Amino acid sequence: MEHKPIAGQDALVPPDADVARRYLDAADAVVGRRVRAIDRRALARLQILNAAITAGYLVAFALVLRQSDVLASQVILFTFLVWGQLASGMAQRNGMQWRWSSSRWPLLLGGGVVLVGAVVVFGLVGLDTTLPVGMVLIPAGMVLLGIGGHGVVQLIRASGDPRPARPSRISLPASARWGTLLVGLALGVLTMLAGAPDGVLRSVITLLVMMALLAWIVAFSTPVGLPAVGASWRWPHVATFLATACIPVGLVSGGDVLGDRGLSGVVGGATIVVLFAAISFVPGRQSRG
């Protein structure tokens, strides 16, 4: 190892072979900790999943906006916000760090351009009912190709990474179990409200539920916050959320197809609560060391 002396200071004594070997061992240990802490495959898969979910919500949101159904759009929006909070916990669990760096600016700029373009097209399609309804697929396609495509590239790049050790399965902590139950209760209530007949009472109750959800989202750093809940989930919990989230979204975007919308809302909401009560006893995953 060659040291460059600082002006006015004596050169450092080069380390002997034993010290140099310990330096190399320490460097290897840092690389090992990074591999254990960051799972680039999982982050890429999560990005692809987020792109697909965002595309689906853009389509549903645009459809209800074209119908001028404000309450329906709120149900869809808050369901999507809940997923966003859960997904942020999953991303942090797999090693994603929300830090700004110069190397990330091109990626952030490109992602921002895609999102802004998708939002502009989404606004035009959702608010201008004279445009063909099929155009709701354009912003969804932009998100899938832009964000999802980048996730595919990241997944290919991570194909050569050593596979990290599979985290242990553990029973959900009490806070995560209660948080999981609250997620099911929130989705169940939203589903019942989505199927309820229009009226002042429905509007007031929906507003109260939205305010409670907003308060919960603001309390993201608490043990029962949505990011902490999402970080403890495994695939059965995620699959249950995605399947049950389709029920209120389906009711508000095409509930007439289901027949009695009120009955569908009650049955669907009760089913969601029962499913989440059961899934809260399914083991979660331990955080990476």
Image: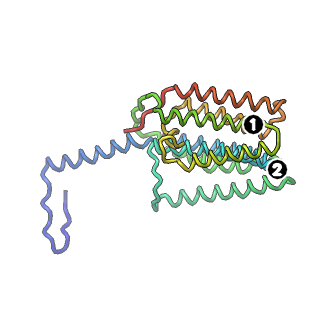
**Left or right of 161 on screen, residue 253:** right
Quadrant of the drawing holding the N terminus = bottom left
* Residue 152 in the image: above or below residue 118: above
Please state the total of marks drawn on the protein image: 2
Q: Position of residue 189 (x, y in %)?
A: 68, 36
Q: What crowding class fits label 1: few (fewer than 14 Cα within 10 Å), some (14-19), or many (20 or more)?
A: some
Residue lying farthest right? Answer: 130
Tell me what residue is drawn at x 74 percent, y 53 percent. Answer: 122
Tell me what residue is drawn at x 59 percent, y 48 percent. Answer: 215
| Disc sitting over residue 87 in the figure | none
Tell me what residue is drawn at x 51 percent, y 40 percent. Answer: 224
Q: Is disc 1 in contact with disc 2, using a CB cutoff of under 8 Å?
A: no
Question: Dot 2: what SS?
Answer: loop
Quadrant of the drawing holding the C terminus = top left
Q: Which residue is mark 2?
A: 68
Residue 206 appears in the figure: yes
> Image quadrant of residue 259?
top right
Q: Position of residue 39 (x, y in %)?
A: 44, 41
Marks 1/2: CA–CA distance: 16 Å
Q: What crowding class fits label 2: few (fewer than 14 Cα within 10 Å), some (14-19), or many (20 or more)?
A: some
Q: For this rendering, which residue is in front, 53 or 253?
A: 253
Question: Dot 1: what SS?
Answer: helix
Q: Earlier in the sequence, mark 1 or mark 2?
A: 2
Q: Which residue is mark 1?
A: 250
Q: Amino acid at mark 2?
A: Ser
* Residue 81 in the image: above or below residue 10: above
Residue 43 appears in the figure: no
Q: Position of residue 6 (x, y in %)?
A: 20, 70
